[in-house]
Image: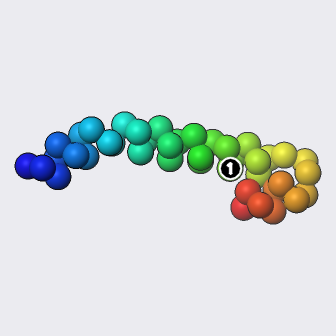
Amino acid sequence: MRLATTISRVGPSILLTATSESIAFLVGSLTPMPAVQIFSL
């Protein structure tokens, strides 16, 4: 019960963080700068 309450409270924050990081690394891997591409992979 406590675990479900905790997950329901922090779940949206975790989802937003994971989504924004994934998008940032995707955009970084498409950047023409080699150093940024390597970092993003």
| Image coords of residue 8 (percent x, y) | 24, 40
Residue located farthest toward the left when viewing the structure as drawn? 1
Q: In the depicted view, which residue is nearer to us: 34 or 9?
A: 9
| Image coords of residue 37 (percent x, y) | 82, 56
The C terminus: image quadrant: bottom right
**How busy is the neighbourhood of tag 1: few (under 14 within 10 Å), some, or many (20 plus)?**
some
Query: Dot 1 lies on which element?
Result: helix
Q: In the depicted view, which residue is nearer to us: 3 or 22?
A: 3
In this rendering, the count of numbered labels is 1
Decide: is 22 above or below 38. above
Left or right, residue 19 beside residue 12: right
Left or right, residue 40 beside residue 5: right
Left or right, residue 18 beside residue 11: right
Decide: is 9 above or below 18. above
Residue that appears at 17% across and 52% down: 3
Residue that appears at 90% across and 48% down: 32
Residue hosting label 1: 25
| Image coords of residue 6 (percent x, y) | 22, 46
Residue that appears at 27% across and 38% down: 9
Residue located farthest toward the right when viewing the structure as drawn? 33
Q: In the depicted view, which residue is nearer to us: 26 or 17?
A: 17
| Image coords of residue 21 (percent x, y) | 59, 46
Colour mode of the rendering: rainbow
Q: Name the amino acid, label 1.
A: Phe
Residue that appears at 83% across and 54% down: 36
